[in-house]
Amino acid sequence: MREQRAFRIPSFDILEARVVLDSSIGAVPAASVLAAPAIDTARQATALDVPPADTPVPPPDQWGLNQHAQNVQRAQWGGIEVLFLGDSITYGWGDTGRAAPGSQAWNAQIAPLHAANFGLLGDVTQNVLWQIQYGELNSKPKVAVLLIGTNNLGGLGQSPEDTASGISAILTQIRVLSPQTKILVMGIFPRGATPDDPLRGEVRDTNALIANLGDGHTVRFLDIGLRLMDFDGTIPRSIMTDYIHPSAEAYQIWADSIQATLADMLGQGLTKSAASAGSLHTTAAAGGNASQALFQVGEPGSGGVDVPVFIPPAPLSTSAIVTTDSHARKSDLLDAVSAELLN
């Protein structure tokens, strides 16, 4: 049986089954909070068993509630065409007036798309679901970019199946609240230094489930995990210093990988830079090591071309690859293959 961990919501009032918020935040409908269960008096009044991943729950602290209120206000101003939703990994892009590891890539490639970043530190699917139900989609963006779930797996100890159900619930809610919004679902990023990290398999299993949620047009799935790893499946510290949160280099990879996809979803057309937005689909991924993969130029379901690519564990000797860094070698290989196809 999986370990169940304490899940906290702010200032929980057991008698009235509501969340007591600071007056500066404003009232929140009572229906937005789970009904109070019978809680043993020996337990802390603010602790609940982990709710299912598809259950809306507010942010767990005052900081999160304040950030949510600011996001709602910004959404009401309008002008957001691309909305990023997620946890600390998304938060790390930065945003207008807020510096972060991803700021350079954000300012150069993402912000010009009239983008806004509503990612919050520590968010799980439950939080994102609540936040979009209570105002964060008021801007009716053309595209929502969603990356969520790593904290469900590694923080709450929830299963890949439960985590995937939470992501599915978010997609459903977006389509109900803003039917015209297209959704780019990112595969959960790999975590842990080596392929044998226990969470690697859970990330892989979750991604396999949510990959089926895309239709190739209104909802697209893109997994860039292999671009964040070396040939042997390890994650370089230059990509994730703590093996969870991306570095500036990783955010640049992410930006390059989604730029053409976002342009297409916004109706701006595809260019040869679509090579950067291609995705790798592993065909032999036991233990996180890919000996062969399918590199798809274009998006799933959009007529893209699947090309088998052999990914060796040792350095390649080829004129297309001029660097000695294994991570850069892999990225160069993918770009070289896709460039040849597009020429």
Image: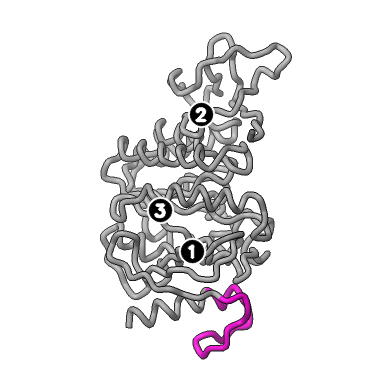
Q: Nearer the viewer, mark 2 or mark 3?
A: 2
Res 112 → quadrant: bottom left
The C terminus appears in which quarter of the rendering? bottom left
Task: Name the side, left or right, on which 132 lies relative to 251.
Answer: left
Q: Badge 3, how many Cα within 10 Å: few under 14, some, many 20+? A: many
The N terminus appears in which quarter of the rendering? top right
Q: Nearer the viewer, mark 1 or mark 2?
A: 1
Start-end of magenta stretch: 312-330
Residue 9 locus on image (x, y percent): 59, 26
Q: Nearer the viewer, mark 1 or mark 3?
A: 1
* First of labels 2, 3 by sequence position: 2
The amino acid on which the numbered mark 2 sits, given as a three-letter code, is: Val
Q: Is residue 110 visible?
A: yes
Q: Secondary structure at mark 3?
A: strand
For disc 1, the marked residue is 282
Determine the CA span between mark 2 and mark 3: 25 Å
The answer to whether residue 29 is above or below residue 259 is above
For disc 2, the marked residue is 57
**Which residue is drawn at the image coordinates 54% and 28% (left, top)?**
51
Question: Outermost residue, top direction?
Answer: 15
The residue lying toward the viewer, choosing from 179 and 74, is 179
